[in-house]
Image (cartoon, rainbow, N blue to C red):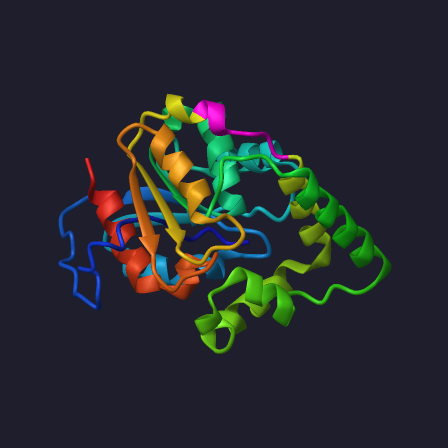
Amino acid sequence: MASLAIESIGNTTDRNWGGAEHIPATGMALEPVVFLPGLLCDQALWRRQIHALADVAAPMVADLTLDDTIAAMAERTLAAAPRRFSLAGLSMGGYVALEIMRRAPERVSRLALINSSARSDTPERTLQRKIGIESLRRGKFVGITHKLLGQLVHADHTEGFVADEMRGMASRVGGDAFIRQQQAIMTRPDSLDGLQSIRVPTMVVVGDGDRITPPDHAREIHERIAGSSYHEIGSCGHMAALEHPEQVNFLLRNWLQRG
């Protein structure tokens, strides 16, 4: 997977993002930003953010398809990343981001967690994942089904661009990588107790209709990281970067220029 991507994040209650033009940050050095995709996602997840933030960010999108533990994903990302960087993760990418904060906090200058959680997998979700893995091993990988799409995105986005992008990414990631990612997710550590030790500027973003990592998961992250900002996007499910790119771009720009 090619290197790309950068990220930033902001506030949906501010409503200043609505289609506003930004003033290019001329003369400023670009901030290295590492983007971490979610389950069944590739660099296309961050395409609009990379384009919108090209004047302030030097992006890299980590490849999270090769490993079957969150720890290995974090180590592979750290090996490829710049010496110091801003870090943004969506969903599974957020789990990897928190592992990076455990392993190398001195290398991260800012943290953005989008549609993610600091909790470990529940026994119920682990069982569901194991059943899904066994079913896939006996059958054929079908990618993003209409039922799964309805769980991932807001009802407004189950047809059209967002749905097409989700299906395209899943097809490119494929069944073998999906199994590795599911194994990593269901064995991930609980990160709640370590949140208080995070000292970098942190932004937490969630969709008001996120059914995978709901707003209460995001709020508990925000409440445990001193000085963090919390942003809830309306009419949005679990894929904010795709569902509401303009809002996420605005938030990410503010996040990158903070401090």
Query: Compared with residue 113, is residue 142 higher up or lower down, i.e. above or below?
Result: below
Residue at 54 percent across and 60 percent down: it is: 152
Foreground residue among 207 and 29: 207
Foreground residue among 195 and 39: 195
Residue at 55 percent across and 54 percent down: it is: 1
Query: Residue 206 magenta-drawn?
Result: no
Q: Residue 54, can we see it?
A: no
Q: Quadrant of residue 125?
A: top right
* Residue 132 place in picture, x, y as percent: 75, 54
Image check: 217 left or right of 166?
left
* Residue range highlighted in magenta: 188-194
Query: Compared with residue 176, is residue 202 higher up or lower down, i.e. above or below?
Result: above
* Residue 209 place in picture, x, y as percent: 44, 58
Foreground residue among 48 and 194: 194
* Residue 55 place in picture, x, y as percent: 23, 55
Residue at 54 percent across and 45 percent down: it is: 92
Image check: 162 left or right of 122?
left
Q: How many marks?
A: 0
Residue at 38 percent across and 28 percent down: it is: 107
Query: Compared with residue 127, is residue 151 higher up or lower down, i.e. above or below?
Result: below
Q: Residue most toward the bottom?
A: 160
Foreground residue among 53 and 40: 40
* Residue 137 place in picture, x, y as percent: 82, 55
